[in-house]
Image: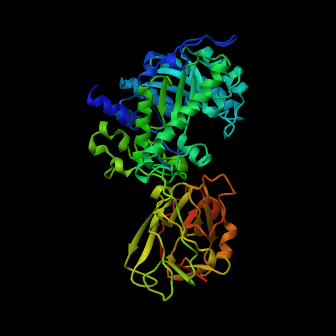
Amino acid sequence: MTSRSILMRLALAVTLAFALVACGGGGTVPSGGVSLRALPADYATRHAAAYSPFRSNNRDTETVTSAEVLQDLQLLLQADIKLIRLFDSSDNVSRLTLQVIRANQLDIKVHLGAYVISGNDAFNQAEIARAMALANTYDDIVEAVSVGNETMVSWSFNKFTPTQIAAFLTSVRAGIKQPVTTDDNWAFWASAPAELLKTVDFVSLHTYSLLDTVSDPTSWDWQQTGVAANLRAAAMMDASIAKAKQDVAAAQTYLHGIGYTALPMVIGETGWKAVATGGETLRAHTVNQKMYCDRLAAWHASAGGPVNIVWFEAFDEPWKGGDDGWGLFDVARKARYVVQSLIPQADWEAGTTTDADAVYFIPTMAAGPVTADRYTVYAETVTPGEALPSSAWAWGAWQDGTTAVATEISTTAAEGTKSMQITPTPLSWGWGMTVNFTTGAENLSNFQATGTLNFSIKTTYPGKVSVGFLTGTATGASLYDVYIPIASGDYGYVNDGAWHDVHIPISAITPYGAMAFGMTDSTKAKLDLATVTNPFVINDTYAITGKADGGNITTPILVDGIYWAK
């Protein structure tokens, strides 16, 4: 084995070919099922990734160009990715992508999608027709067709019945020669009814160990607290692959148990975030992303397993908000650690990364209750008797630091000589900036009854802003947002461009509390002033402050003298 092939296996693992016989390549089809169409041989040997070309915060208004698609596909070829999964059969994405592949004679094959929308039959019939037309027109490129994406699993936001999807599959299969399937979560495939199974040529299963740590934190032990800290990252990633194998085994055991031993199994989606965009703190990181890939490669090298694994996804897509950050490349088309060994260094993501940078769980421990009458978060002037943060802290923007920039300036201040200038760089829904503890929490429960949140502010920012704090931790699935929207004139806040002192009772802020994004268990994600992890937050979520989506307001906000008092 050459050093390059080793690098490819360890750095990529973006689609992994397995022996067909290990996942049901032989056997029989139960009575009434289709006569299975085999996947092309190279479908199992080409490295694969899910591909979507969108680069902006709003895909609905973005115009994708052939030059952009060509740039993307050439990057994927450099990374030895030669099979892409497309999610739909739209003209502006899928037809364009197929045209670019053919026009430039690129060595890329396609697993085509047909994206159906619940309750919109006219659209669905048109999409089905487009899928069949593309599969037939580009039959030298399209190797398989998938109808529907996560439409039947219990938590689907775009719900269809198996009967409906089976009807679509039957229609598509009659009009093309390629094998067909539907893409869905492993939990669906582990209980899929025969009426659906009889219409597919192979299984395309999704498994996301990382997302399970947010949606179902007890599904596997990602924290690995019984392992020494210096070994905990590796232990977490080992456990993540064990969870993926468990998901596949559950589906496979069920299918074999009802006689579907011949259905080949593909992992249609799996991946690991490089950045924490949806509550995956201490899990998502570019090194951990590579570690997940490496372990997929080891799984590939072992006996048994899926025919193929499609990595989710090729490039970051900012419009996805809290579901962004999965890309092998960032939105600027810079290579992440996982594929850097195959990409020129000039095209790497900024910064220096080593294996030692992997993240892992660190328990958050709050000290005893703060007993001082004043707890100072950010100020230069020393106040006698004040308490200061007991843990290291930093300014940090929402969406992994992308929605605002905090810069300390010395040109104006409400106290001392410096203040913090917050410049929004919003996504379509808004922005946020926090003071967050990097490893600990603060017990500010003594401020709950009679305390106030105080700060000075200078801005001409239009309309309302929201201010407050956050309690709980992502690792404990207990994050709780506590932000009150204030308008000019509320609690001393005025947006006239001069410095003003704001004093808001904690009791006025707490009624606005709500479970943070990604939290699902209200018994855990609730107000807990004994575990304050962000003692100051300022943000503008447009839907809350009454602004239009995509407002793109970038007016700077200066803050100073931030403290809690009672």
Image vertical order of residue 185 relative to residue 528, above or below: above
Q: Which residue is found at the position 66% from the left and 81% from the top?
A: 450
- Residue 185 position, x and y percent, is 61, 34
- Residue 59 position, x and y percent, is 52, 44
Q: Seen in the image, is 86 located left or right of residue 344?
A: right
Let me know if residue 328 appears in the view.
no
Image vertical order of residue 552 relative to residue 322, above or below: below
- Residue 297 position, x and y percent, is 41, 31
Let me know if residue 504 appears in the view.
yes
Image vertical order of residue 194 relative to residue 361, above or below: above
* Residue 10 placement: quadrant: top left
Q: Seen in the image, is 537 located left or right of residue 333?
A: right
Image vertical order of residue 543 relative to residue 466, above or below: above
Q: Quadrant of the N terminus?
A: top left
Furthest-bottom residue in this view: 384
Which is nearer the eye, 555 or 249?
Answer: 249
Q: Which residue is found at the position 67% from the left and 32% from the top?
A: 152
Q: Quadrant of the C terminus?
A: bottom right
- Residue 112 position, x and y percent, is 52, 26
Q: Which residue is found at the position 53% from the left and 25% from the top?
A: 266
Total residue callouts? 0
What colour scheme has been applied to the protein in the rendered image? rainbow
